[in-house]
Image: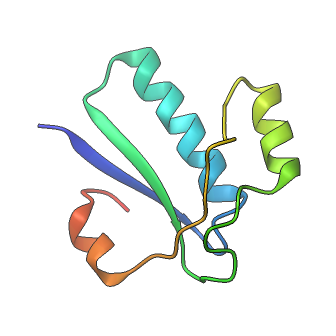
Amino acid sequence: MTTRLLMVCLGNICRSPTAEGAVRDAIARHGLDATVERRGTAGWHAGRPADPRTIRHAGDRRLDLRGHRARKLVAADLDAFDLV
């Protein structure tokens, strides 16, 4: 059974995308049966990419955040994920 993980921060353009990238990398390196996504508690940045500084620093650590688009946390997310 695949474990579904959700990383959450305020705006979903820096901390949670970075956490998602790091956890996604760990899942791949360790061959875990899990998926990971990210959301923000506020919708200010919905649809926007990760902050350019975040993309740059993540890239320095071999984490690819270029495809990220911010999404707001909704109540249904709390039921859709095993760990938030």
Taking the spot 24% from the left edge, 57% from the top edge, the residue there is 82
Side of 53 relative to 73 (left or right): right
Say which quadrant the C terminus sits in.
Answer: bottom left
- Whether 21 is drawn above or below 11: the answer is above
Side of 72 relative to 18 (left or right): left
- Whether 31 is drawn above or below 82: the answer is above
Question: Which of the two residues, 63 or 46, is positioned nearer the viewer here?
Answer: 46
Side of 29 relative to 60 (left or right): left
Residue 63 placement (x, y as % from top left) = 67, 30
Taking the spot 88% from the left edge, 49% from the top edge, the residue there is 53
- Whether 23 is drawn above or below 50: the answer is above
Residue 5 placement (x, y as % from top left) = 36, 51
- Whether 22 is drawn above or below 53: the answer is above
| Picture quadrant where residue 80 is located | bottom left
Taking the spot 60% from the left edge, 82% from the top edge, the residue there is 43
Residue 68 placement (x, y as % from top left) = 61, 50
Q: How many marks?
A: 0
| Picture quadrant where residue 78 is located | bottom left
Taking the spot 27% from the left edge, 77% from the top edge, the residue there is 76
Say which quadrant the N terminus sits in.
Answer: top left
Side of 43 relative to 13 (left or right): left
Tell me how the rendering is colored. Answer: rainbow
